[in-house]
Amino acid sequence: MSTAPEPLRAALALAAAGVPVLPLRRGKVPFGNCRFCKDGACGGRPNMKTAGPCRCPAPCHAWAAATTDPHVLTSPVWASAWREAVAVAYHPGGAGLTVVDLDNAAAVTWARKTLPATRTVPTTRGEHWIYQGTMTSSNAVRPGVDIKSLTQYARWLGPGTGRMAALPAAVRALTVKEDTTPAGGAVASSLPARATWGRTVATGCRHTERYVRTGLERGLALVRARTESGAGSQAFGVARFLAAQHIECPGPCGLAAIGEEVVAAAVSVGVPENYARRAVANGLETTAERAA
Ligand SMILES: [Zn+2]
Ligand SMILES: [Zn+2]
Ligand SMILES: [Zn+2]
């Protein structure tokens, strides 16, 4: 093992710590797919978004090949990749992590002003900020800022410094797209049958119906007031706030119905429904995780 290439030695150490890894070739990109996997001929791996039956022993399909299994990492097909590898990548989502990839000095400055401190790793022109917790990956959420977590790989550039913080709501909110369509009366008609919150769906809630209803109406008014922009983020904030009212309840509190009402309010001021749903789901989920 003393002759193992440096990237492989680093990869094995990471894998032993529970971080799924893969080799990067020249250009710091994953190795291309083998001829059986080329152009998705294999259908893809089971862990991919469109899941397929691929069990290819080669490091095909980029992040989806990342593994902690030392036998796979040192297998003959991977060994030839490691001999050509110039760097190691890891699958942040597979390790329960999210990397906020800050590409340049301006992005780093923004993060220092906006995000809670966490473990940071210097990169060529910027920094990786690493948080505990996973989310959907998204590129260019702001100028020079990518989110790498599930279904993504990130380059391994060392352990970094600083204490790792839990993935904050401020980062989750970055993937909530702002609505750009102006408010209009027509969009409301495309709404699905509207679910409303009531006692029947909140059998385990310790609050009075009036308390919940008042908070909900206040939140809906905040969302509906955002007729120009920001209704998506507002929906996220309102969902998070409303869910937080119930962290002490034995449940169920009918949070899904509350979420539906917030979605409907956001859609009524022009937020595309899929964005609204994601914003609200993220908001409810953020609180649920904090309560756990
Ligand atoms: Zn393959
Ligand atoms: Zn394949
Ligand atoms: Zn409750």
Image: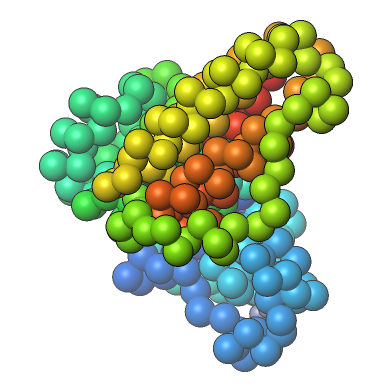
Q: In the rendered image, which quarter is residue 99 located in?
A: top left
- Outermost residue on the front side: it is 185
> Does residue 251 appear to the left or right of 110 in the view shown?
right
- Outermost residue on the left side: it is 106
| Residue beneath the point at 35% across and 71% down | 26
Residue 137 position (above or below residue 81): above
Q: Quadrant of ligand 1?
A: bottom right
> Does residue 125 appear to the left or right of 102 in the view shown?
left
Give x and y (percent) for residue 97: 53, 38
Residue 137 position (above or below residue 28): above
| Residue beneath the point at 20% across and 42% down | 107
In which quadrant is the C terminus drawn? top right
Task: Report whether residue 111 is seen.
Answer: yes
Which residue is more in the foreground, 277 or 81? 277
> Does residue 184 appear to the left or right of 51 in the view shown?
left
| Residue beneath the point at 27% across and 47% down | 228
Residue 169 position (above or below residue 226): above
How many numbered circles does the render carry? 0
Which residue is more in the foreground, 187 or 86? 187
Residue 115 position (above or below residue 8): above
